[in-house]
């Protein structure tokens, strides 16, 4: 069986090059020539080229590189040579411009010929009359706190301090079930607004950040408020993820909307709560004694717990885990189109989501017949086994070799062929040869570690550093919407070399995805090596 992957057993990347030349039989019956307009000398420009008299022949079409993804379940990437050559001439041009500043209040003050602070009632009335689409656009793009305060007052009802007239909370009302909910007047406006970092912090606090204002999710873990850092672990009991999930969320006494504001210690806290909850839940499944009530485990305590779990799992007769796979993800950034399309999951404070996934699930219509439960890491495991059976080799060892032995597709040996952005003794951050997002990065353990339970304190520290470096690079280049996912090996699996892998998937404004991407055909306009150059340059600036 020939496996569809760009990684060869020789530790090199393989890919195809399309060099089209073809003839097309002209089946059109009629010519529909029209004048399109005039040139600068007022001579007509027509569309005769669109209506050839005979057949069409292309003798030298543009070259297209076809790179199978290392993992067959992720499709293939197609790179247009002309586009990529243009970027190769200037790799540092692979950036996105920063958002433009915008202020409706400033605009109205000019149009109405009044000072910004001298016509508050008129401005409030003008905002109240704006169409919903304009309100949503402002909520997403305005950089003026005065705009955003006016929008906030249109989106919900506040309770104010009598002396300073600053908000101290929201107005609540009773719903049909007798529960009290915030009185939100315009839900889409409210959600878009609270994701805008320019909204004054006091409004962020009372609208969404204060524990309880968004619902009854219990706080069941905490990275303590030390070193200017503080993180809560929220429990989402009734989750879209079966059996619930947790969210490690920057606490409400800090404001961390952007990667630029996020410290190493903040990020360490976000990840610590993920490691801690995972290890605790596995230990509970094994009926192990846990000395961790109403406290945050220290790094050394957590490492000791991890080692004890591994020892327990290796004992003969230990029952299989019901929950044996980790699920971790991060939605960074938010946008909401005026047309009503939500372009990314809600961001608000920076937060991660995580859970444990069951090994099996009961088949419908039966009492004890089980089917396998899904984890995205299983797709990696299935392919790794196929590769191992086909070549009697470790896929990941060959993948690492291919990255290190990489050569450019354009064969320009005077340009860098390095795909690695950052690495240490435990992890490698790199640009995949076949990117599934135009700016995709991947982080992989370079040692045989397939999940966080197999990762000791040094590897976990490297993972934290690698993930944060990736996000600093991508946001530094201008990415605003980034999805990050983890592909992990199921706990206890020992027959394959499956490495822990993270994929960073920015959404690019001009390439959000369409039918090609739905078919797992990813279109790219640069060589991966040139994106790696841009990433390394950005990382060096931090």
Image (cartoon, rainbow, N blue to C red):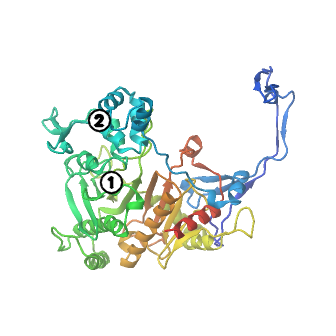
Q: Which residue position is annotated with label 2?
A: 155
Q: Residue 120 appears in which quarter of the rendering?
A: top left
Q: Earlier in the sequence, mark 2 or mark 1?
A: 2
Q: Residues within 10 Å of mark 2 (few under 14, many from 20)?
A: many
Residue at disc 2, secondary structure: helix
Residue 310: x, y in percent?
Answer: 32, 76
Residue 143: x, y in percent?
Answer: 41, 45
Q: Residues within 10 Å of mark 1 (few under 14, many from 20)?
A: many
433 w.r.t. 165: above or below: below
Q: Which residue position is annotated with label 1?
A: 349
Instruction: Determine the residue positioned at 28% across, 68% down.
Output: 276
Q: Residue 316 appears in which quarter of the rendering?
A: bottom left
Instruction: Determine the residue positioned at 34% across, 50% down.
Output: 348
**Image quadrant occupied by the N terminus:** bottom right
Residue at disc 1, secondary structure: loop
361 w.r.t. 166: above or below: below
Q: Residue 233 appears in which quarter of the rendering?
A: bottom left
């Amino acid at each position: 069986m020939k496996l569809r992957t760009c990684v060869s057993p020789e530790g090199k990347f393989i890919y195809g090059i399309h060099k089209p030349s073809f003839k097309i039989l002209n089946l059109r019956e009629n010519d529909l020539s029209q004048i399109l307009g005039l040139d600068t000398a007022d001579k007509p420009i027509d569309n005769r080229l669109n209506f050839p008299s005979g057949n069409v022949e292309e003798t030298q079409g543009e070259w297209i590189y076809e790179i199978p993804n290392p993992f067959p379940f992720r499709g293939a990437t197609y790179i247009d040579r002309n586009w990529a050559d243009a970027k190769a001439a200037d790799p540092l041009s692979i950036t996105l411009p920063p958002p433009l500043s915008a202020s409706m209040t400033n605009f109205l003050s000019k149009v109405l010929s009044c000072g910004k602070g001298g016509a508050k009632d008129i401005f409030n009335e003008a905002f109240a009359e704006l169409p919903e689409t304009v309100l949503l656009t402002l909520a997403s793009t305005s950089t003026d706190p005065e705009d955003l305060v006016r929008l906030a007052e249109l989106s919900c009802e506040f309770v104010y301090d009598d002396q300073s007239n600053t908000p101290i909370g929201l107005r609540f009302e009773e719903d049909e079930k007798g529960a009290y909910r915030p009185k939100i007047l315009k839900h889409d406006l409210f959600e878009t607004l609270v994701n805008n970092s320019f909204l004054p912090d006091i409004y962020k606090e009372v609208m969404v950040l204060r524990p309880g204002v968004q619902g009854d999710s219990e706080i069941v873990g905490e990275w303590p408020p030390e070193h200017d850092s503080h993180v809560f672990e929220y429990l989402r009991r009734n989750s879209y993820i079966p059996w619930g999930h947790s969210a490690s969320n920057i606490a409400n006494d800090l404001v961390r909307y952007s990667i630029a504001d996020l410290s190493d210690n903040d990020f360490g806290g976000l990840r610590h709560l993920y490691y801690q909850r995972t290890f605790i839940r596995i230990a509970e499944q094994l009926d192990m004694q846990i000395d961790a009530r109403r406290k945050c485990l220290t790094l050394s305590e957590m490492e000791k717990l991890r080692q004890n779990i591994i020892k327990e799992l290796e004992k003969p007769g230990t029952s299989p885990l019901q929950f044996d796979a980790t699920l971790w993800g991060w939605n960074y950034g938010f946008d909401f189109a005026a047309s009503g399309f939500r372009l990314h999951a809600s961001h608000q404070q920076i937060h991660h989501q995580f859970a444990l996934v069951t090994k099996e699930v009961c088949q419908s219509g039966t009492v004890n017949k089980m089917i396998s439960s899904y984890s995205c890491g299983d797709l990696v495991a299935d392919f790794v086994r196929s590769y191992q059976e086909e070549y009697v080799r470790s896929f990941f060892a060959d993948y690492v070799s291919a990255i290190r032995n990489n050569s450019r597709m354009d064969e320009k040996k005077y340009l860098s062929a390095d795909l690695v952005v950052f690495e240490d003794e435990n992890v490698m951050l790199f640009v995949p040869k076949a990117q599934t997002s135009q700016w995709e990065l991947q982080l992989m353990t370079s040692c045989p570690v397939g999940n966080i339970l197999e990762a000791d304190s040094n590897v976990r520290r490297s993972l934290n550093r690698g993930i944060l470096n990736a996000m600093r690079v991508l946001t530094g280049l201008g990415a605003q919407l980034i999805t990050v996912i983890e592909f992990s090996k199921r706990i206890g699996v020992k027959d394959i070399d499956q490495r822990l892998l993270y994929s960073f998937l920015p959404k690019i404004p001009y390439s959000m995805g369409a039918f090609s991407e739905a078919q797992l055909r990813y279109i790219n306009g640069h060589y991966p090596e040139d994106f790696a150059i841009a990433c390394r340059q950005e990382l060096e600036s931090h």
